[in-house]
Image (spheres, rainbow, N blue to C red):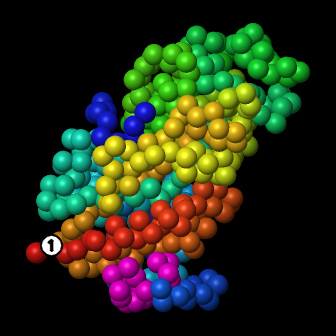
Amino acid sequence: MKLSRISRAGTAVMVGALALTLAACSSDGSEGSDTEPGGSESSAGGDLESLSGSLAGAGASSQENAVAGWIAGFGDLAPGVTVTYDAVGSGGGREQFIAGATQFAGSDAALDEEEFAAAQERCYGGDVLELPLYISPIAVVYNLPDVDAANIQLSAENIAKIFDGQITSWDDPAIAAENEGVELPAIDIIPVHRSDESGTTENFTEYLAAASNGAWAHEPSGDWPTEGGQSGAQTQGLIDTVNGAEGAIGYADASRAGDLGTVAIKVGEEYVPYSPEAAAAVVDASPRAENATDTQLVVELDRSTTAAGAYPLVLISYSIACGTYETQADVDNVKGYLGYVASEEGQARAAEPDVAGAAPISEDLRAEVQAALDSITVQG
């Protein structure tokens, strides 16, 4: 299944509840190197400390924790720039970027054809960058406090039937057959989905469509395709809803699972719990999308893989930016911030368990991202 250029049926949460104003000095005293993207030199060739102004982004709530860490880390290097991120969801982020309200967006799905054309117009007829800078498992989370198991085990087929309302009780024989020795409660299953247009939903339904052996009959979509169940807005709203109802099950970026139980999904003949390493294994084994370019680094994830140790329920969240901006300040600030996000330092920060537990991008991908960032120019 492709993440890029797909059709989608057509409230804001600020990181830390407020726009984050960048700290004026480094908490660890590190100034970075002059050559690394995350060091003291920006990808535009200027000292990050000399950058100034504001940089606005909006989009995926899945990467909200990572973005908070990136903003703080970038602030140690570029104290003159105020970076904000409105975690309104992937669809809202794409809309704000296309409307020119932000300089960059975060999206758990690549732009579709109509959005891409509109983004090109917004970017003064120039290129549009789609950079896979946040890689994270999607956890299937559940609220069963009395179940004594490290992870409930489920195949994609049974996950699909649960969210489609075909399996309605936790002690259903189909679930019991995958969890021998686990005492499952005879309580109703409460499926919980996102109420807003969501890249996480698109990735989740794409996995169900590809891996469930036909049990999921709906097209992948950022808008939840079925009736029934409960819902929550953005990632936090879904997590709150699952936390509030025993028997509930939902899906969210794994960094937000908290104390909820998480499903080990069936891959081949084994059950694999989520981990950054298992998510990275799928990304590394997946090809680029058919229409990928040097600046649209879109990955076509292999959702139906049977590779040992792989976790195919993964999202890639793209940073979307223009290839052309109106001012040199926007050029330098976008290059500097996204260069830091892509850097070894920035990726390591997002990988920290208490930040987001993301899977760092590879060195090869980092070089491709930096080349794309280096191509950004000012209008005229």
Can I make out residue 9 in this image? yes
For the record, the magenta segment spans: 36-51
Can I make out residue 61 in this image? no
Q: Secondary structure at mark 1?
A: loop
In this rendering, position of residue 10 left or right of residue 239? left
Say which residue appears at 78% left-offset and 15% top-offset: 177
Q: Is residue 334 magenta?
A: no
Q: Residue 20 at x, y = what percent?
A: 46, 69
The crowding category of the residue bearing disc 1, from other C-alpha atoms within 10 Å (few below 14, some 14 to 19, many at least 20), is: some
- Name the foreground residue: 77 vs 281: 281
Say which residue appears at 68% left-offset and 29% top-offset: 268
In this rendering, position of residue 197 left or right of residue 77? left
Q: Amino acid at mark 1?
A: Gln
- Most common secondary structure along the magenta stretch: loop
Q: Residue 29 at x, y = what percent?
A: 62, 89
Which residue is identified by label 1? 379
